[in-house]
Image: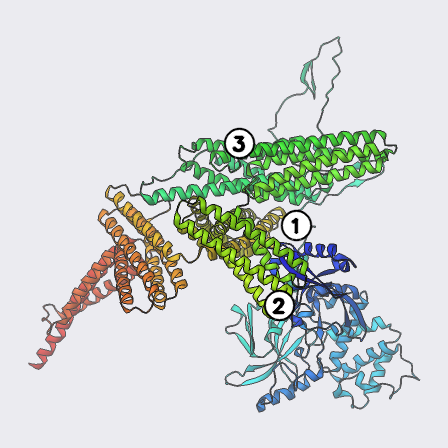
């Protein structure tokens, strides 16, 4: 991979360093590398620093997330990243005027920072508070308010401004957005923010026990009362003033607290300041408070404020439509924790109130806000306002708090499960009693007498004969290796959850074993080309699914081995449950695929019974593992390792049965020998550690050495077991990860052993032996992991072109970052010269060995071009070194570097293209496997998903992905089988691109469903699978884009090839139909295929119209896309046509359908060919005319194909019959009636009723089977003919009456 050259600026000392990173480097690792290599960056705690990508606009700069990779941010060579401290001071002002400075993380959002800010201040319910950015007066526009102002306001809008000046609404407050950071909202470090309660939900619980919140609540209520936000009567205002005086001045003092002492502006709303006797009334209320403390007075003040009807209401000034008139009037819209209300703007009386529970949805636009109350109100409530988004956020915030509080209230146990068992233990110094549930065997009651002579019953060996005159032998029973369940220590909650997971998994495994007892039954299949292709595709799909599921089973088994290795108290039982859930869910899905594959398998690979037997063996091995890892089993560790090894062996046997064993036996043998070499080296280390333990004087240190050596031996035996498990599926990245994880455990245990020995003795000779033995273990472990990594790269040596090409590309990119460093430039130029020399030599060698003279000439010409470009590059570099400040020399160097890149691409095009296609094949295979795992995890999580809507969305996305997996698998198989076929490569590219959108949707659905899954193991499995799928999709997206660029435009040729193949398949189907051997494929029915044919015909017509338009415009790219879509639609059409022909019982109709479909394919091939020719001469009138003629012929063939549908012919006959019947009305004169008037009228009424009924039957039949439509259309034409006859008869009656009147 090409290295990424970045400029790292250490901000606190303004030092800039140029460093190279792999694009796949995580940001966390990049920060670690910077601290290691840049001395100036080694200050403070590493966790306080991060990388910042700055921008000209400070608001647009972003902090790089530690878990992301560098290529996620699309960085380019030369980009500047700032390494600086994320912590910054922020001043927070309270409503009481106090200011606190809090250190905040600049990379976190306001919502996340409120947790820190509120905890520092002493506020627990942080979700009800928010921050306000106090705007500077100079920046404000004229006037303020909910409705934005303009100098050209109309008179009624000016009235709104005057009204707004009297009211205090929430739009005056510039609340910060909780989803964005301080920097993104333009908050400067020196700016002071105001902390204020935004949501009044739990304020009822605030009392003297929470003085911090009480004070903030008091100050906010006081300010709102004084500025008029809460209208109060004069009496209430004085009462509030009395409490306020008690809070500020303490108890009332007669000689001090007299009229003239108070500044009434600070104690009364402005409308009561000049009222006579106001101050005297306040002091009277103050006196009534007595010796009340400040805290008590604040409690009284807040309690009284809560009784106000406007308390806790956020007001917005809006305009609403006056009822019955087309006029907008001002109104206050209030939002509380319980409701939305319409409030009179003058008196603040509540006019109408809607509980929040009745709000179904709401919508905010730049100039309006609309509420939908569903069934609770007939119409929407819509108002005019520019603060719709702020209103929407307030409502959403209240609903979020309500839901959060409700969820916490609904919790019964630690995990929120009301069915969980509460265990109570009674422990005293003398005894401890533990009560647990005892599982006893039940049976029927037996009647009998215990008073039987000469018989003594004992509990150990059954009844014994009693002999008179002798003593019986002593009765004794000894139980070895077991303990009664009632005496076992109680399981932890995590262990209990794991037991539940294991029990469920064992039931699933048993069900899978039962299902594998018999083969699937398939309907009889034909021998035509389409049937053979269907069978081959199903075999390939089943093999892929089984392989990916076996990969998951072995990886899960290795994970269980690794996770259960240490002390049971330190075991992550949730992760163990996740691994077990992965094993059981994949085994369940694998059994279905095995049954289908066993029914489809040819004798070349093996019989179906052998495959079923291998699958049952794997299921049995999984069952043994589940029994061994039960927390209550008491099985030794070796039993777990043996069961895991059996799973590995059974997995290899199963893969060999299906012919998917990608790992050869030699590789597996080498892998196992390397793992055993690690174990042997570890055994030697244990012996050396034993020698140290023998000479250790301190018992504690001696025991520590023995424990470390024992752990080292266990970790190596675990590594061998893990290698045995994953060796058959080592091609899977997850299996490689598990083996690498087991290796890390060995490495850590070796380090611990060495440290324990060093602490236990000072004997240099013994320590030297231990160190040497540890080095041997490390080397053996390195060899093992290197062997695994070699297989990860398929063990393919780097091609002669690949290494040189990568070097040239890397150097030409990084050479500009070396400007200013002459020594580095010279070194880069030497590397470049050597790489191009190697590449030119390889090309000349290939040219000499080439048999085809044309190809030889092309290689030599490309080699010469590359050599000339290299010479120009070297000369340009020399020129720049002589004149580094000359812009012309810099430009010449850039042009030379770009020319060399172009020449390199041209020279190594085939090698690069092959490498890119191989990468796409691997990415597609991994994406399909990850999708299969995610689907299995989704099905496993369905039982414990408490949110039906989220589960339904996940199921739908899984179905969409399941429909795309076969095309992706077929694309991979086709590309691997025909490595040089452009059509196969394009099919892989198209299937990969089509897979991305549904795959991304499934990732989103899975992530959304994870929080709603109550089973922790299932939720963890779903989360991990979604994460792996997201990673695979990202790689697939990159690989498909590069492959599409490398393979070039070839959609038209591929479409032609596809259509020709479809034509051949239909011809083969016609021959099978003639011999009566054409059979429908599994799942095909006449109705389904007919429906698919009808709907696909429209898609074919649409894509062909697009093809004509693009070809006429001469747009090659869009013409190729249209040709590809046309071919895809024709493929569906051909499948539907074959299904109709195979399902119908009329041989003539089947032949006609296949012939018409073949005509469509033939015409479509001509159309695509003509479109290709039209691109050569876009303005050629003759070419355009031929294109139109061919399109017309294809449209005619398409209509004929649709008309061949069963029932369609009967509809056409009915239409013709109706047309013929209608001609009866074209005569000049109607024949005279021969029936009485009453009879003619009755017949006309009956004919009309029959026709009406027939019309309804036709409509109903269109939704049913084709035979029903044929019968209904025929009946309709007959009834229509009778209706016309009756009408003509009635018209003859009227005409005869007129003649009689004239006579």
Identify the image quadrant of the C terminus.
bottom left
For the residue pair 462 and 948, the one nearer the viewer reads as: 948
- Location of mark 3 (residue): 617
For the residue pair 1277 and 1206, the one nearer the viewer reads as: 1206
The residue most toward the left is 1303
Give the CA distance from mark 3 to mark 2.
55 Å
Where does residue 1071 sit, x and y in percent of width and height?
25, 44
Q: Which mark is residue 490?
A: none
N-terminal label among 3 and 2:
2
For the residue pair 757 and 407, the one nearer the viewer reads as: 757
- Location of mark 1 (residue): 418
Where does residue 112 sit, x and y in percent of width and height?
70, 63
The image quarter containing residue 313 is bottom right
Seen at 87% across and 86% down, the residue is 261
Callout 1: SS = loop
Report if the CB atoms under discs 3 and 1 are less than 8 Å apart.
no
1061 with respect to 216 (left or right): left
- Location of mark 2 (residue): 396
Seen at 67% across and 20% down, the residue is 450
The image quarter containing residue 528 is top left
Callout 3: SS = helix
Where does residue 892 sit, x and y in percent of width and height?
56, 66
The image quarter containing residue 448 is top right
Callout 2: SS = helix
């Amino acid at each position: 991979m090409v290295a990424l050259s970045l400029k790292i600026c250490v901000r606190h000392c303004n030092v800039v360093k140029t460093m190279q990173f792999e694009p796949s480097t995580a940001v966390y690792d990049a920060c670690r590398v910077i601290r290691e290599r840049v001395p100036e960056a080694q200050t403070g705690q590493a966790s306080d620093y991060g990388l910042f990508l700055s921008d000209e606009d400070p608001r647009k700069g972003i902090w790089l997330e530690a878990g992301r990779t560098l290529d996620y941010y699309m960085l380019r060579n030369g980009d500047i990243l700032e390494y600086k401290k994320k912590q910054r001071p922020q001043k927070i002002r309270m409503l009481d005027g106090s200011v606190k400075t809090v250190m905040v993380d600049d990379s976190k959002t306001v919502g996340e920072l409120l947790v820190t800010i509120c905890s520092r201040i002493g506020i627990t319910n942080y979700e009800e508070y928010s921050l306000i950015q106090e705007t500077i007066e100079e920046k404000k526009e004229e006037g303020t308010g909910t409705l934005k102002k303009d100098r050209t306001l109309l008179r009624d809008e000016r009235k709104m401004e005057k009204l707004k000046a009297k009211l205090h609404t929430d739009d005056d407050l510039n609340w910060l957005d909780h989803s964005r950071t301080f920097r993104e909202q333009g908050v400067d470090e020196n700016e002071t923010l105001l902390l204020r309660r935004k949501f009044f939900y739990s304020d009822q619980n605030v009392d003297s026990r929470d003085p911090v919140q009480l004070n903030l609540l008091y100050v906010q209520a006081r300010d709102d009362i004084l500025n008029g936000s809460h209208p109060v009567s004069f009496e209430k205002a004085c009462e509030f003033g009395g409490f306020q005086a008690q809070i500020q001045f303490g108890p009332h003092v007669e000689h001090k607290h007299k009229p003239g002492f108070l500044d009434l502006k600070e104690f009364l709303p402005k409308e009561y300041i000049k009222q006579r006797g106001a101050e005297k009334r306040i002091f009277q209320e103050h006196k009534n408070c007595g010796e009340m403390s400040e805290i008590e007075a604040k409690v009284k003040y807040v309690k009284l404020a809560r009784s106000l009807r406007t308390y806790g209401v956020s007001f917005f000034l809006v305009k609403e439509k006056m009822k019955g008139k087309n006029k907008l009037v001002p109104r206050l819209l209030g939002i509380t924790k319980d409701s939305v209300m319409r409030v009179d703007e003058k008196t603040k009386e509540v006019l109408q109130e809607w509980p929040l529970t009745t709000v179904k949805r709401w919508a905010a636009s730049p100039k309006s806000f609309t509420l939908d109350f569903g069934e609770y109100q007939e119409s929407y409530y819509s108002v005019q306002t520019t603060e719709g988004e702020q209103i929407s956020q307030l409502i959403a915030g209240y609903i979020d708090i309500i839901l959060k509080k409700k969820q916490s209230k609904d919790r019964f146990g630690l995990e929120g499960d009301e069915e969980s068992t509460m265990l109570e233990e009674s422990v005293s110094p003398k005894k401890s009693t533990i009560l647990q549930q005892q599982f006893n065997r039940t049976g029927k009651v037996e009647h009998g007498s215990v008073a039987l002579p000469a018989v003594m019953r004992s509990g150990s060996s059954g009844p014994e004969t009693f002999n008179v005159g002798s003593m019986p032998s002593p009765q004794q029973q000894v139980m070895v290796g077991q303990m009664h369940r009632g005496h076992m220590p109680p399981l932890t909650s995590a262990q209990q959850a794991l037991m539940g997971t294991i029990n469920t998994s064992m039931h699933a495994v048993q069900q899978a074993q039962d299902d594998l007892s018999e083969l699937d039954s398939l309907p009889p299949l034909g021998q035509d080309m389409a049937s053979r292709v269907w069978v081959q595709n199903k075999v390939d799909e089943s093999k892929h699914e089984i392989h990916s599921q076996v990969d998951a089973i072995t990886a899960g088994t290795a994970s269980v081995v690794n996770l259960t290795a240490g002390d049971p108290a330190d075991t992550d039982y949730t992760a163990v449950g996740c691994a077990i859930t992965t094993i059981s869910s994949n085994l369940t899905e694998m059994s279905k695929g095995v049954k289908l594959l066993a029914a489809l398998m040819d004798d070349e690979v093996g019989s179906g019974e052998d495959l079923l037997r291998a699958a049952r063996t794997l299921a049995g091995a999984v069952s043994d593992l589940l029994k061994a890892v039960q927390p209550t089993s008491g099985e030794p560790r070796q039993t777990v390792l043996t069961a895991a090894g059996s799973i590995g062996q059974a997995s290899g046997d199963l893969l060999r049965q299906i012919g998917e064993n990608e790992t050869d036996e030699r590789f597996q043998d080498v892998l196992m020998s390397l793992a055993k070499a690690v174990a042997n080296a570890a055994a030697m280390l244990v012996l050396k550690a034993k020698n140290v333990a023998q000479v250790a004087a301190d018992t504690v240190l001696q025991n520590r050495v023995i424990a470390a050596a024992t752990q080292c031996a266990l970790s190596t035996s675990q590594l061998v077991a893990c290698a045995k498990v994953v060796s058959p599926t080592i091609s899977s990245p997850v299996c490689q990860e598990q083996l690498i994880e087991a290796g890390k455990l060995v490495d850590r245990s070796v380090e611990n052993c060495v440290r324990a020995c060093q602490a236990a003795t000072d004997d240099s000779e013994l320590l030297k032996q231990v160190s040497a033995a540890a080095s041997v273990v490390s080397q053996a472990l390195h060899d093992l992991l290197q062997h695994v990594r070699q297989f990860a790269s398929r063990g393919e040596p780097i091609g002669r072109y690949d290494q040189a090409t990568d070097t040239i590309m890397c150097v030409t990119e990084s050479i500009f970052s070396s400007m200013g460093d002459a020594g580095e430039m010279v070194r880069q130029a030497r590397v470049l010269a050597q790489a191009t020399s190697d590449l030119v030599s390889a090309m000349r060698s290939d040219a000499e060995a080439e048999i085809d003279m044309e190809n030889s000439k092309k290689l030599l010409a490309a080699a010469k071009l590359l050599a000339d470009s290299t010479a120009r590059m070297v000369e340009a570099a020399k020129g720049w070194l002589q004149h580094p400040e000359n812009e012309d020399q810099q430009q010449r160097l850039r042009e030379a570097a770009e020319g060399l890149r172009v020449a390199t691409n041209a020279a190594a095009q085939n090698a690069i293209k092959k490498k890119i296609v191989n990468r796409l094949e691997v990415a597609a295979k991994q994406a399909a496997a990850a999708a299969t795992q995610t689907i299995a995890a989704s099905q496993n999580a369905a039982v414990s998903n408490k949110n039906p809507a989220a589960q339904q969305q996940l199921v739908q996305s899984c179905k969409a992905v399941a429909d795309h997996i076969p095309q992706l698998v077929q694309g991979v198989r086709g590309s691997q089988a025909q490595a040089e076929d452009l059509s196969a490569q394009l099919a892989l590219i198209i299937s990969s691109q089509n897979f991305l959108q549904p795959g991304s949707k499934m990732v989103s659905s899975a992530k959304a469903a994870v929080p709603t899954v109550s089973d922790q193991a299932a939720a963890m499995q779903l989360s991990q699978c979604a994460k792996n799928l997201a990673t695979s999709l990202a790689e697939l997206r990159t690989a498909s884009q590069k492959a599409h660029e490398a393979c070039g435009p070839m959609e038209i040729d591929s479409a032609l090839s596809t259509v020709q193949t479809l034509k051949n398949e239909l011809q083969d189907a016609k021959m099978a139909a003639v011999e009566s051997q054409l059979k429908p494929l599994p799942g095909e029915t006449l109705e389904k295929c007919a429906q698919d044919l009808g709907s696909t015909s429209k898609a074919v017509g649409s894509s062909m119209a697009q093809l004509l338009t693009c070809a006429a415009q001469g747009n090659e790219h869009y013409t190729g896309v249209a040709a590809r879509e046309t071919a895809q639609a024709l493929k569906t059409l051909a499948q539907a046509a074959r299904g109709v022909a195979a399902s119908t019982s009329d041989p003539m109709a089947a032949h006609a359908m296949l012939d018409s479909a073949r005509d469509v394919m033939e015409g479509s091939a001509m159309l695509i060919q003509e479109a290709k020719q039209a691109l050569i001469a876009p303005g050629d009138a003759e070419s355009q005319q031929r294109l139109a003629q061919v399109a017309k012929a294809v449209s005619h063939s398409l209509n004929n194909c649709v008309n061949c549908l069963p029932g369609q012919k009967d509809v056409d006959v009915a239409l013709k019959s109706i047309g013929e019947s209608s001609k009866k009305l074209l005569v000049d004169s109607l024949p005279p009636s021969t029936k009485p008037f009453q009879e003619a009228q009755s017949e006309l009424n009956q004919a009309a009723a029959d026709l009406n009924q027939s019309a309804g039957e036709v409509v109903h039949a269109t939704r049913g089977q084709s035979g029903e439509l044929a019968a209904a259309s025929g009946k309709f034409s007959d009834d229509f003919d009778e209706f016309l006859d009756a009408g003509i008869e009635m018209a003859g009656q009227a005409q005869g009456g007129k003649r009689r009147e004239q006579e």
